[in-house]
C-alpha cells in the first residue's frame, strides 16, 4: 500500500480544471402541429401497448396458477375411477364376512362361492383399469417380464422355458408393475 504524505498533498498545486465545453445557443424548439399530433398518437399507441402487455402478463400468471391447481386436482383424484370400481368389491367382502358369521353350518360352501365371486369382481375391476396379468407358464424366460427364483431339471420342457409360476406378474399397459416369479427349466445332465 502506498503511503501518502498529507502535508505534501495539501501544498501541491491542484490540477488545472478541464476546459468547459463551449455553450451552444439553444433556440426554442419549434414543433409543427403535425409533429405534435404524431407524437400524441405515438404516445397513445405506446400507452395502449403497455396496457395490453400488462393484461397479457396478468392472463399468463392466471393461466399458470389455474394449470397448477388443475394439476394438483388431477393428482389428488387420479385414482377416483379405479376406487369407484373397487367399492362394490369391498361391499361384497363385507357381505361375505357377515354371511359367514351368521350361518356357520353352511358357511364353508357359501363363503367359497362368495369369495370366488368377489375374486372375479376384483379381477374385472382391475382389468377395466388397464391391469394385465403376465402369463409366464410355458413361455421362454424373459428377464424383462419374469423373475427367476429357481431352476428345475426336467425333460418335459425346453431349457430356458418357465415350468412353474410361483407368483403372478402384472403390467399396466407397457409398464411392468411386478415381474412374475418363476421356476425355469434346466436340462438334466446326460
Image (tube, rainbow, N blue to C red):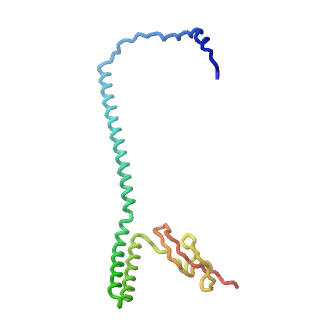
Quarter of the image with the N terminus in it = top right
Residue sitting at x 41%, y 10% = 25
Q: Is residue 20 above or below residue 132?
A: above
The total of numbered circles placed on residues is 0
**Splitting the image into 4 quarters, where does residue 4 fall?**
top right
Q: Residue furthest bottom?
A: 105
Q: Could you say which is closer to the camera, residue 58 or residue 97?
A: 97
Q: Residue at x 36, y 45 (%)?
A: 61
The residue depicted at 48 percent of the width and 72 percent of the height is 170
Can you say which quadrant of the picture contains the C terminus? Answer: bottom right
- Indicate whether 53 appears above or below 110: above
Q: Tell me which corner region of the image, top left, top right, bottom left or bottom right, holds residue 152.
A: bottom right
With respect to residue 79, does 134 lie above or below? below
Where residue 137 appears, x then y in whole percent?
Answer: 53, 80
Task: Give the left or right position of residue 38, taking residue 127 as reference.
Answer: left
Q: Residue at x 36, y 53 (%)?
A: 69
| 124 and 80: which is toward the camera | 80
Residue 148: x, y in percent? 58, 75
Would you place residue 107 above or below residue 143 in this image?
A: below
**Picture coordinates of residue 112 (x, y %)?**
39, 86
Amino acid at each position: 500500500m502506498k503511503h501518502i504524505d498529507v502535508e505534501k498533498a495539501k501544498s501541491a498545486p491542484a490540477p488545472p480544471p478541464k476546459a468547459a465545453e463551449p455553450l451552444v445557443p439553444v433556440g426554442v424548439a419549434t414543433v409543427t402541429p403535425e409533429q405534435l399530433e404524431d407524437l400524441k398518437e405515438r404516445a397513445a399507441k405506446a400507452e395502449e401497448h403497455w396496457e395490453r402487455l400488462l393484461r397479457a402478463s396478468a392472463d399468463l400468471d392466471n393461466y399458470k396458477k389455474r394449470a397448477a391447481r388443475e394439476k394438483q386436482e388431477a393428482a389428488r383424484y387420479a385414482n377416483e375411477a379405479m376406487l369407484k370400481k373397487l367399492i362394490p368389491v369391498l361391499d361384497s367382502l363385507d357381505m361375505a364376512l357377515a354371511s359367514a358369521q351368521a350361518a356357520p353350518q353352511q358357511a364353508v360352501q357359501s363363503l367359497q362361492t362368495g369369495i370366488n365371486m368377489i375374486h372375479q369382481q376384483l379381477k374385472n375391476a382391475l382389468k377395466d383399469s388397464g391391469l394385465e396379468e403376465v402369463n409366464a407358464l410355458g413361455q421362454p424366460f424373459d428377464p424383462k417380464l419374469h423373475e427367476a427364483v429357481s431352476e428345475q431339471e426336467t425333460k418335459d420342457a425346453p431349457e430356458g422355458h418357465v415350468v412353474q409360476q410361483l407368483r403372478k406378474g402384472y403390467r399396466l399397459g407397457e409398464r411392468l408393475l411386478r415381474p412374475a416369479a418363476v421356476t425355469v427349466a434346466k436340462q438334466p445332465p446326460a
